[in-house]
Amino acid sequence: MPLDHVTITAGDFAASLAFYDATLGALGLSRVVEFGDEEEEDADVEAAGWGAGDSAVLWLVAGPAPTSGLHVSLRAASRAEVEAFHAAALAHGGRSHDAPRRWAIFRRGQFNAVVTDPDGNLLEAVAPE
């Protein structure tokens, strides 16, 4: 069964929005949907989804207990996208877990990078070599 989407709860929603906008944007994904409290006028965004087209594959929500320890791996089109993803993450509150590189032992024919989001989740970009 194919995966439909992943949801991550953020401890600091604004910081995580900036992080995910930048890192996912480097992979060609954009924020395709966002929601605020329906009972408030001009409510702050409390949920956002990124994807290609109009279908969100990764959701970020505000909540009292942030997700931590999750590992999400996303496909990149090229080595350049992986490098841009890594640079964007570091510029927007992420930390490098694994710098862009070839993984000759574990993932032959792939180039990837792994970053940590503001809450400690691992986000990976993988491209064919």
Image: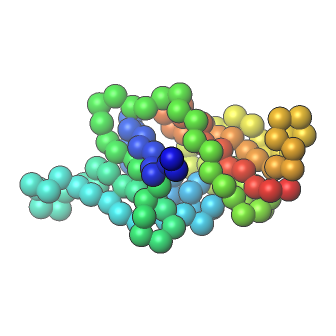
Q: Residue at x 45, y 45 (%)?
A: 6
Outermost residue toward the bottom? Answer: 53
Specify whether 49 is left or right of 75: left
Task: Say which residue appears at 32% left-offset and 51% top-offset.
Answer: 47
Rendered location of residue 93, percent (x, y): 56, 43
| Residue found at the very far front of the displayed protein | 1
Decide if residue 2 is in sight here.
yes
On-image quarter of the C terminus: bottom right
Q: Is residue 31 above or below residue 64?
A: below
- x and y percent of residue 114 in the render? 69, 41
In this rendering, position of residue 126 left or right of residue 103: left
Q: Residue furthest right?
A: 104
x 41%, y 43%: residue: 7
In this picture, is 86 found above or below 51?
above
Determine which quarter of the picture holds residue 95. top right
Please name whichever residue, 65 or 19, is drawn nearer the observer in this view of the structure.
Answer: 65
At x 56% / y 49%, what residue is drawn? 92
x then y, percent, for residue 35: 27, 57
| Residue 1 placement, left or right of 62 | right
